Image: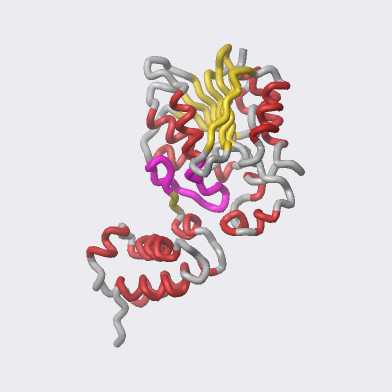
């Protein structure tokens, strides 16, 4: 009887994925580790470990889906953000590394000695709110989303990391906040233009379209966030928005027109202005 070891399974998987992805080796390791319920380190600690027929079948099924383009994060149900393991699914976006810049800018504006009130709008998997809540346990955070499925995922992620300083609310943008005011408001809203050809490429094909697109220019959600933000910010409070790599000028103009000041843009690792922050009077 032929026996397939960890090493052989990974070799075959890499050969299947290499023509499609630069990340073939990593993808293969993540998928096999998921099937075996082990870590990636374990795979190389026990390279001669044999796989059962059931494990091979499950691995092959995942590889077939990956070859069709399904993101690895959706296949494993897991993604890492800010060194946190998070549940993700088809109701949530897959957290991107560039969004960690939004967390950095939020944390830089939260004094260690102040119990700041923070709102995160469109929380999805809860990645941003959870990262901030872990780093600033003395702060109170309200996280909203219009998707009940995404909100349920965010709640499970917060529970996984034993965080009790986040309150999750269902609704669109500022709707669930009533008349409340905050020291900081943050959002990674949909900002891709409808009809953008990139929507038919890569992981974007499988992510929820409502969390990606916002009107003909991709600015509809940002306009709403800017327009109503000042009525929910304390004096001197900050609004921080993630946006497209070529939208910084348009976002800055929206903020200026709505009466914000101290408008600042921050580049991602590729040098593109990805985060804009502005202060309310």
Give the residues in magenta. Answer: 80-98
From the top left corner, tell me how far across and down residue 232 is, in percent.
62, 19
The answer to which of 252 and 67 lies nearer the viewer is 252
Color theme of the render = secondary structure
User: Is residue 180 in view from this perspective?
Assistant: no
User: Is residue 201 in view from this perspective?
Assistant: yes
Instruction: Spot the residue most to the right.
Output: 216
- In the rendered image, which quarter contains the N terminus? bottom left
Residue pictured at 28% horizontal, 58% vertical? 41
Quadrant of the image occupied by residue 23: bottom left
Residue pictured at 36% horizontal, 77% vertical? 53
From the top left corner, tell me how far across and down residue 261 is, in percent.
62, 17
From the top left corner, tell me how far across and down residue 9 is, in percent.
35, 73
How many numbered marks does the figure carry?
Answer: 0
- In the rendered image, which quarter contains the C terminus? top right
Residue pictured at 67% horizontal, 45% vertical? 192
The answer to which of 63 and 87 lies nearer the viewer is 63
From the top left corner, tell me how far across and down residue 218 is, in percent.
70, 41
Above or below: residue 274 compared with residue 60: above
Above or below: residue 10 compared with residue 265: below
In this picture, residue 17 sits left or right of residue 138: right
In this picture, residue 226 sits left or right of residue 16: right
Residue pictured at 72% horizontal, 36% vertical? 220
Above or below: residue 258 compared with residue 128: above
Instruction: Spot the residue most to the front.
Output: 271
Q: Is residue 256 magenta?
A: no
Above or below: residue 183 compared with residue 120: above
Quadrant of the image occupied by residue 272: top right
């Amino acid at each position: 009887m032929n026996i397939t070891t960890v090493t052989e399974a990974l070799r075959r998987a890499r050969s299947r994925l290499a023509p499609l992805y630069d990340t073939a080796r990593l993808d293969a390791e993540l998928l096999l580790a998921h099937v075996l319920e082990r870590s990636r380190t374990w795979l190389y600690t026990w390279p001669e470990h044999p796989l059962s027929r059931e494990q091979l079948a499950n691995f092959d099924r995942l590889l077939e889906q990956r070859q069709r383009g399904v993101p690895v994060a959706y296949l494993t149900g897991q993604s890492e953000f800010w060194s946190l393991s998070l549940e993700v699914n088809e109701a949530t976006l897959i957290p991107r590394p560039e969004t960690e810049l939004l967390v950095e800018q939020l944390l830089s504006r939260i004094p260690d000695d102040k119990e700041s009130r923070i709102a995160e709008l469109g929380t999805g998997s809860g990645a941003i709110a959870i990262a901030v809540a872990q780093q600033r346990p003395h702060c109170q955070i309200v996280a909203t989303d219009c998707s009940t499925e995404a909100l349920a995922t965010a709640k499970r992620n917060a529970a996984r990391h034993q965080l009790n300083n986040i309150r999750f609310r269902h609704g669109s943008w500022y709707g669930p906040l009533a008349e409340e005011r905050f020291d900081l408001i943050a959002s990674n809203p949909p900002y891709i233009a409808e009809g953008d050809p990139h929507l038919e490429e890569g992981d974007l094909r499988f992510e929820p379209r409502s969390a990606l697109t916002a009107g003909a220019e991709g600015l509809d959600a940002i306009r709403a966030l800017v327009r109503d933000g000042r009525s929910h910010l304390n004096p001197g409070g900050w609004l921080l928005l993630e946006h497209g790599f070529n939208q910084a000028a348009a976002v800055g103009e929206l903020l200026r027109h709505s009466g914000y000041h101290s408008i600042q843009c921050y580049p991602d690792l590729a040098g593109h202005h990805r985060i804009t922050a502005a202060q309310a009077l």
